[in-house]
Image (cartoon, grey):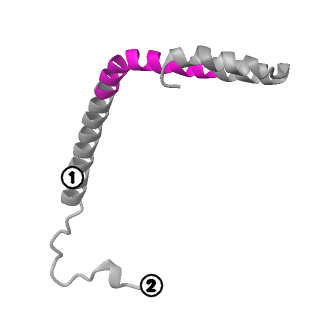
Amino acid sequence: METVQELIPLAKELMAHKPSRKLVKLYVLGSVLALFGVVLCLVETVCSPFTASSRLREEEAAAAELRAARERQALRTQALREKGKPREAAPGSRALSKRQHAS
């Protein structure tokens, strides 16, 4: 239905065919559901600018938090690398990883 003016001739035509009560109930139910859908779409359209801006703020906050977490992780990794750097071995000492068993 493109316009509301088409609903009245459609209703007259349906009533001229003398539909059963069940069919009329089905038409009424479909019309109510369609009207409910239209109302929901209108409410969503009216409220969407407000929800879009709040969603944008939430996404920006999440991105900033993610950047901060990555930066903290990079600092931790760098600290672990510096801490785990192999020290120069004393001359004549063996590496512990080459020993297969205790002597």
Vertical arrangement, residue 15 with respect to residue 74, above or below: above
**Span colored in magenta:** 33-56
Residue 39 visible in the shown view: no
Q: Residues within 10 Å of mark 1 (few under 14, many from 20)?
A: few
Q: Is residue 46 magenta?
A: yes
What is the three-letter code of the residue carrying label 2? Answer: His
Q: CA distance from mark 2 to mark 1?
A: 32 Å
Q: Is residue 11 left or right of residue 39?
A: right
Where is mark 1, residue-wise? 79
Q: Residue 86 colored magenta?
A: no
- Closer to us: 92 or 21: 21
* Number of disc labels: 2
Side of 68 where 101 appears, left or right: right
Q: Position of residue 47 (x, y in %)?
A: 39, 16
Q: Position of residue 23 (x, y in %)?
A: 79, 24
The C terminus: image quadrant: bottom left
Q: What number is the disc on residue 96?
A: none
In the image, residue 95 lies at what x, y percent?
28, 80
Q: Label 2 belongs to which residue?
A: 101
Three-letter code, disc 1: Ala
- Left or right placement of residue 69 versus residue 102 in this view: left
Up-down: is 102 above or below 58?
below
Residue at 30% x, 22% y is 53
Secondary element at image label 1? helix
SS for callout 2: loop
Mark 2, residues whose alpha carbon is within 10 Å: few (<14), some, or many (≥20)?
few
